[in-house]
Amino acid sequence: MSNSIPSLPSDLKPFAFLLDVDGTILDLAPTPRGVFVSHELRDTLTRLWQRTDGGVAFVSGRPVSELDLIFSPLQLPAIGGHGAELRTTPGAAPEAPRLPALDPAVKRQFAAIAEAGPGIILEDKGYSLALHYRLAPDKGDLVRAAAAKICAGVKGASIELLPGKLVVEIKQTGFTKATAVRELMTYPRFSSRRPIFLGDDVTDLGVFEILPDFDGIGISVGRNVPGVEARFGQPADVRRWLAQVSRNDAFATS
């Protein structure tokens, strides 16, 4: 199902498609490694890249190296690590990290939360650490409270919690998806374009907030976002729409 999805012209070169990954173009999986990228989606992204003349980028909490792995052989421009990494040239290494890696001592404290019971999965992203409790939803209150306690006790570092869908993540403050999108939009490949951002989670809200600065279009997935009229119900709807746009098919909203 879709709501207020804008119609686009046949010429997509004036636009930049900025795509969150998990929960937006990919269905959420019980574990981070369990996501599935179909051949059809790879073909869609390739066509979209061609039709926009290079105006496609991922905006993700995953590291750029992991995005390359799950979307292989595609290597698109990407924001990774919730803004810690930025790659503006497809296939190239990311520019210098915007944040240092998390302190190993802090990681060990946070990792100890996973010992609270089976089903709590630890994911080390380098710049952040995530605890997924999709397989143990009853442990959600425990995980969130323990993570908040660790953050409050960390001295000499600015640490923040990123809540998500059955996941909580810890990272250093300073860069976000929104700050990285601002930087991305200064590069020649993107600076003259109108961004179309699709996102589904709390960490995407900052990007929606800055879109008016670029005359951008925001499309939320699975949730109502204040100020964002366009919404898809689920990732399958997003994939279907992107496939139609990439083929220049007519798209009827409902």
Image (spheres, grey):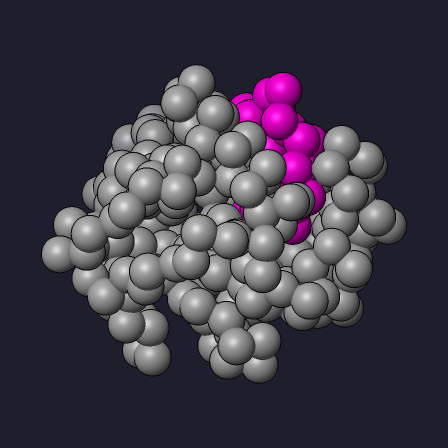
Q: Residue at x 59, y 37 (%)?
A: 50
Q: In this view, does 202 lie above or below 87?
A: below
The quadrant in which residue 67 appears is top right
Visible residue check, residue 41: yes
Q: Where is residue 227 in the image (x, y as percent from the top left)?
A: 34, 79
Task: Give whichever of 179, 125 is nearer the camera.
Answer: 179
Left/right placement of residue 74 relative to residue 137 reads: right
Q: For the C terminus, which image quadrant?
A: bottom left
Q: Position of residue 123 (x, y in %)?
A: 54, 35
Q: Where is residue 87 in the image (x, y as percent from the top left)?
A: 75, 46
Left/right placement of residue 180 relative to residue 216 reads: right
Q: Is residue 11 magenta?
A: no
Left/right placement of residue 115 relative to residue 139 reads: right
Q: Which residue is drawn at 41% across and 66% down?
A: 218
Visible residue check, residue 106: no
The quadrant in which residue 249 appears is top left
Q: Residue at x 20, y 62 (%)?
A: 3
Q: Is residue 230 above or below residue 11?
A: below
Q: Which residue is drawn at 33% across and 60% down?
A: 7
Q: In this view, does 195 lie above or below 140?
A: below
Magenta stretch in the rendered image: 58-81
Q: In this view, does 99 lie above or below 111?
A: below
